[in-house]
Amino acid sequence: MNPSPAHASRARRAFSVLTACLVAAVIGTGAALTLASNHTPDAPGTNAPNAPQASGGPLAGPSVLPSQPAPAMPDPTVSFTLVAAGDVLPHQPVLASAAKGKGYDFTKQFAPTSAMISGADIAICHMETPVAPPGTKPSGYPMFGAPASLVRDLGKAGWDGCSTASNHTVDRGFDGLKATLDAFQDAGMGYAGSARTEQESTHVQFYNVVEGGRTVKVAHISYTYGLNGLPVPSGKPWSVNVLNADGADVTPIVDAAANARDHGADVVIASVHCCVEYVTQPNQAQVSIATQIAKSGLVDLYIGHHAHVPQPIEKLPGGPNGAGMWVAYGLGNFISNQDASTVGHAETANGLVLRATFTVPPDDHVSVDVGWSAVTVDRTHGHVVYPITKNTGAVGGLSASQVKSRWQLVADAAGPQAPEITDDEQHLADFVWITPRLP
């Protein structure tokens, strides 16, 4: 897997700008593309001091002291930001809202969130559905098939890649799985959770952050609890990462995390698609899966999907170096046609955007600080996704009271352990959400 890098000008912090792109390292070699940066490290020797000049009186002939090597500089501590969001779930009405001529354009739907997403160093979405294979029409529930332009427009909105393991991954068979990853590759985006070939299934999806001449490798792994009763494509057991749904055995995830570490990962992010829909509190299986992964000490951040409603964000004991592991049990929906009128659950109109800061010192004792922001979908006015706070007021076709009510549902679900991040708070200097991703 060697997708073409997608370059995006991003504001990392007020004092630093990084161009972020994705890379994929092949297991067995650990080889990876170099992350492009607009502050490329100086070439060897360019920082070396000038050779000192000898001084001498009339009797002293010219002399030159040998050049001294530049003193070794310690590796810098690297900090970077990551955002992740809920299910990208293109029901048929969502497709109708994005229809344009003979194709689809989701720019309008994603525009209000673009600055939030593209402002992070790494942005990971969750592609709930496959892309419709070439020669077939897009479709909604129950057997989804999204247009490839959905992936293209996610990339334009600022997303660097997606998890692709879900209960709908094989809705369109292996052809749909392949079309999905083809679309991600064409968009220059990363993907984790499914594979087109056995060799590709052994690759680790890495996103590299380069700062001060140091590269931090961020691995992303993705698993689903099942496939809605559909079989894994015949003869291709490697094509989608499936986890035991009862939470009794997380060995595949732990093994994948260990493998990523073996191949140079400084940070490991796990996306887990499980377990019960439309329930705010995580069930026993979810808690078991997350607890076991935290105890493994191999995963830095756990990102959950599938419930279609926001769920709590909590810090569990364990994690790398025993510092704990943040768990977002469920991020709800990012875009969908769900709300109280369609599925009977008002919470489905909303989602959490997980916003995390990673600090990676030279000793690799990674620390993670997380917060959240709320988003909601204006289903009756074009399925536009809006960032919201309790003070946002009216947006699109939603009244101020509707927005505040939706925000409250998200805040109640997220819980008290992680703070809400709003862009106007002065203490949130780590996040600079001002530069949209360039096409």
Image (cartoon, rainbow, N blue to C red):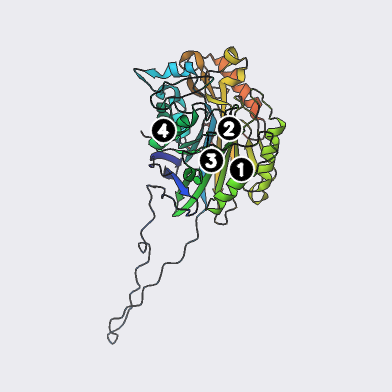
Residue in the picture at 46% in, 65% down: 72
N-term mark: 1 or 3 = 3
N-term mark: 3 or 4 = 4
Q: Is residue 39 above or below residue 331?
A: below
N-term mark: 1 or 4 = 4
Instruction: Write down the residue under mark 2.
Output: 372
**Can you tell which mark lies on residue 253?**
1
Instruction: Write down the residue under mark 4.
Output: 183
Q: Position of residue 291 (x, y in %)?
A: 69, 40
Amino acid type of the residue tagged 3 in the rendering = Trp
Amino acid type of the residue tagged 1 in the rendering = Ile
Q: Position of residue 364 (x, y in %)?
A: 57, 54
What is the distance, in whole Å, between disc 3 and disc 4 at their CAs? 20 Å
Residue in the picture at 52% in, 53% down: 264
N-term mark: 4 or 2 = 4
N-term mark: 1 or 2 = 1
Q: Residue furthest bottom?
A: 59
At mark 3, the secondary structure is: loop
Amino acid type of the residue tagged 4 in the rendering = Ala
